Amino acid sequence: MTTALVQKALATPASLAPLALRIPAGIIFMAHGAQKLFGWFGGFGLEGTGQWLASIGLEPGYLMALASGSAEFFGGLALLIGLLTRPAALVLTVTMLVAIFTVHIGNGMFMSNNGYEFALAMAAISASLAISGGGRFSLDQHLARKVQ
């Protein structure tokens, strides 16, 4: 049972298409997560992000900042290296949907108005990777061979 579950989580096609999504999405997610967690790249860190999240009704703000920042940073890292791509991408899809419906939806579509177009694009990339898996040159593919 456990081996079957691991095989299912690691199963991935030999296609290069997921790689073209994993690398840029992983970098982008990691950078956004680093803003929330560490205050890097002009971010506000956990305290500042937590205060802002609490101000828009996502309580407890600090915990929400930790959860979203961790999902983005560590999920992005998982995408980048192709490790547990499907579960990481699923978590990132949910994270982006929460961002869309709690922060961006009222601003319309376009980024110029803090709209949801960027979060929607990242959700679509994540959903695609949740369906496809990591593809060629992923740790998932490498580990799947060892589990068989």
Image: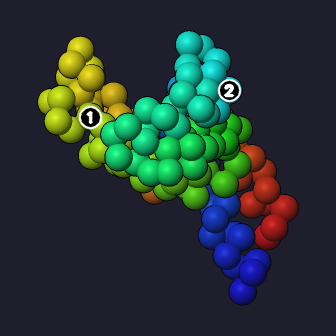
In this view, the residue in front, 18 or 108, is 108
Picture quadrant of residue 126: top left
The image shows residue 50 at horizontal and vertical percentages of 52, 37
The structure residue drawn at horizontal position 49% and vertical position 55%, both measured from the top left corner, is 90
The image shows residue 39 at horizontal and vertical percentages of 63, 21
Quadrant of the drawing holding the N terminus: bottom right
Which residue has dot 2 on it?
38
What's under tag 2, amino acid-wise? Phe
Which residue has dot 1 on it?
104
What's under tag 1, amino acid-wise? His
Q: Secondary structure at mark 2?
A: helix
Q: Secondary structure at mark 1?
A: helix
The image shows residue 76 at horizontal and vertical percentages of 61, 37
Quadrant of the drawing holding the C terminus: bottom right
Characterize the local packing of mark 1: few (<14), some (14-19) or many (20 or more) Cα atoms within 10 angstroms: many
Is residue 127 in view?
Answer: no
Q: Which comes sooner in the sequence, label 2 or label 1?
A: 2
The structure residue drawn at horizontal position 27% and vertical position 23%, both measured from the top left corner, is 114
The image shows residue 41 at horizontal and vertical percentages of 59, 14
